[in-house]
Amino acid sequence: MKNIRALLVAVSALAFISVAQAQPPGAPDPTPAPAAAPAVTDGAASAPYSGDPLVQKRQSDGVAKHAYKARKKAAKRKMKATKKEAKADLKAEKTESTEARDKAMAGEAASK
């Protein structure tokens, strides 16, 4: 346990030193302050580029999810319209067949 603790302390000290050396004293802040608040758009599209592969995957997954949802909504609208049209056709056929049956029955009743 003592070995692990000593190892963690050494690793954290090295990480701190490397970060401190990367930014010399008096250097300007590498992240400039934004001049104005950017317009809110799609989160994945407006996110800054990142070299981290996990961040890139998360952003591309978000874009793909958004595109999938848009395609799914469009397909659902199309399906609903098709279903509504089919219902109207079925209702018209049912009405026609009912009228034809009623005329046929009226003709039979009149001939007896």
Image (cartoon, helix red, strand yellow):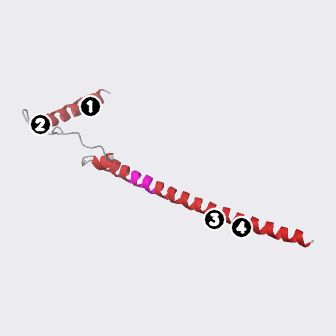
Q: Quadrant of residue 107?
A: bottom right
Q: Nearer the viewer, mark 1 or mark 3?
A: 3
- Identified by mark 1, the residue type is Leu
Outermost top residue: 2
Q: Earlier in the sequence, mark 2 or mark 1?
A: 1
State the residue position of label 3: 89
Marker disc for residue 96: 4
Q: Is residue 82 left or right of residue 51?
A: right
Q: Is residue 1 visible?
A: yes
State the residue position of label 1: 8
Majority secondary structure in the magenta region: helix
* Magenta highlight range: 64-71
Q: Is residue 53 visible?
A: no
Q: Is residue 87 left or right of residue 6?
A: right
Q: Nearer the viewer, mark 1 or mark 4?
A: 4
Q: Earlier in the sequence, mark 1 or mark 3?
A: 1
Mark 2–mark 3 distance (CA, rounded to whole Å): 73 Å
Q: Are marks 2 and 4 in contact (CB under 8 Å)?
A: no
- How packed is label 1: few (under 14 Cα within 10 Å), some, or many (20 or more)? few
Spot occupied by residue 17 in the image (x, y as percentages of width and height): 15, 33
Examine the structure image and report whether residue 96 is included in the region drawn in magenta. Answer: no
State the residue position of label 2: 23
Q: Earlier in the sequence, mark 2 or mark 4?
A: 2
Mark 3–mark 4 distance (CA, rounded to whole Å): 11 Å
| Residue pictured at 63% horizontal, 60% vertical | 87
- Identified by mark 3, the residue type is Asp
